[in-house]
Image (spheres, rainbow, N blue to C red):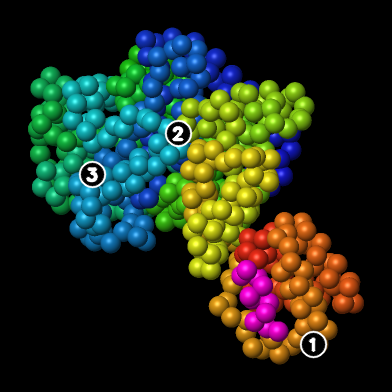
Amino acid sequence: MTSEDPQEEFSIHWIRDLVDKVVERDPDEYLIVTGKSMSGSVHIGFMKEIIIADVIKRELQVLGKKAKTVFISDDYDPIRSFPPSLTLSPDEYMGVPYSDAPDPHGCCESLSAHWTNELVEAFPEFGADPEVVLQSKLYETKEMIDAVRICLEHTETIREILVEYVARDFDDKQKAEYIESMKTWYPASVICPECGRLQSGGKGSIVPNRVTAYDKENDEVSYKCAHCGHSDTGKLDKLRLKLSWRVDWPAKWHVMQTTCEPAGKDHAVKGGSYDTGLEMSRRVFGWSGPVKVPFEWVRLAGRDMGTSKGNVFTPRSWLNIAPSELFRYMVLRTDLEKANNIQTDLIPDLVDIYETFERTYYGLDDVDSEKQDFAKVLYPNTEVRPVSDEYIPKLSFKFAVVTSQLQEILSEDTILERCYDVLKKQHNLTDISTETKALIPTRLSRALHWVKEFGSARDIVEVPENVPADIISTFTDDDKHFLSKLVEVLHIDELDEDEIQSSIFNTAREVDIKPKRAFLLLYRILISRKSGPRLGPFLKLLGNDWVLERIRSVL
């Protein structure tokens, strides 16, 4: 999403079409499920899946249906790679389930719990409240153990499905080799009771501890550990088993009775893992499986993000610089199968776009009926909290960017007073409501984080304690004459920002220097640069007394 906001990008049909499809299932309770492997800090892109699920739930509830969302933390997956931030020893923990590895940060009961908690703690701030299910705990339930048993009993059917779906694009040689390998393949692996691993090796050289035989009559599983060589036969319900990932998904659908699950394009492509899972749902578990909801990824500045690669911009990273409502808006405003591109350098413009959209919902701007209808459907789904009956004015993000950088020279009370003044003028208010005031500190904090991390040189405002001597030495007599006259003007009256701007122009003409030179002088005195924020509002923000003292210091 760029700072432009063309009407043709608006699309609300996906919400209505999708909910119509989900409603047809008519269960006692609609279950919209999401899931993520806990292989590192989870990037902001995953929140698209969470938000899609949340909107489906909200729309079902509007229709009077019983619905809830569930997030499954796939913490039972084995460690296949080590992101740059992970300090555990690969020799010791490669192939161990994330739920069994210790938390090197020392704050949680396991490595997976650390990353799960980091993600889950952000859900409420993005307006989502899914029930959290740990995959490792799910595999301890009778229902999941039964599902594993069903899969082992239907091994031959699962082999046929995988040959049909996985090998469809192989050449003759690859297909023959794959079919041969599947003759002894079983859909589950065993966590070795000796070394605690589910597999040997990492990405590119993985060998799972695959089940080697299943005795249905005695419900016994044989296996051999690919890492330490331990082999044994034991009762299925006494061993720790995990289904292969293409089988694990439909098994969880069956156990949870999932009505609907969103999936990224890598899984949702025609003939991909989602379609494979739906086929297993039909032929192994005897039901249709969930409604498939494909979506495109979220990219960061045109680049794909990856948890295990360490290319991560987390939900918390977003909340540090922008409101969660903006992210929900970016995700929901276009068709799900269109990519979203986060351009962090454009956050101030994007906040403006969202808050203009918000004004449209409340009927405060004169826009066409199509935009009004769009806002009526979409705005409630972008909001994190119940929609307010009345519009709550927001401090301009761009004003907050400048103001937040002046905390070393202006007191907290002064900054808040300046914010109140700007809000009154911007929104034509006589008083500032408690709700509006409560939003200001967060807006200032986000603006400051944004400018420090993503702002350009033009956005950064640094006011040195004193005007450097090498700048003062460049001032001519004409320059000082202009500054003296401006002091007289500013000293007499308390001017508003537009009057200050006009006074600078008028004073420059009066003493016969070019306005461009006048503005240059003031920027150099204030921030030691040749340009900066619009001068009228900036001088008003700094305050008359401070500005007068600053100018006098160079005369």
The CA span between labels 2 and 1 is 58 Å
Q: Disc 1 or disc 3, which is closer to the eye? A: 1
User: What residue does disc 3 label?
Assistant: 99
Mark 3 secondary-structure assignment: helix
Residue 302 is tagged as none
The CA span between labels 2 and 3 is 27 Å
Relative to 431, 107 lies left or right:
left
Q: Position of residue 443 (x, y in %)?
A: 53, 49
Relative to 168, 236 lies left or right:
left
Mark 2 secondary-structure assignment: loop
Is any part of residue 506 visible from this angle? yes
The residue under the point 50% across, 62% down is 411
Residue type highlighted by circle 3: Ser
The residue under the point 25% across, 23% down is 147
Q: Nearer the viewer, residue 36 or 451?
A: 451
- Answer yes or no: do the residues labelled 2 and 3 have beta carbons within 8 Å? no
Q: Nearer the viewer, residue 396 or 476?
A: 476
**Span highlighted in magenta in the image:** 545-555
Residue type highlighted by circle 1: Thr
Residue 127 is tagged as 2
User: What residue does disc 1 label?
Assistant: 476
Indicate yes or no whether the magenta region holds residue 553: yes
Indicate yes or no whether the magenta region holds residue 289: no
Q: Quadrant of residue 9?
A: top right
Q: Is residue 506 above or below residue 274?
A: below
Q: Residue furthest front?
A: 492
Q: Is residue 296 above or below residue 251?
A: below
The residue under the point 48% across, 27% down is 386
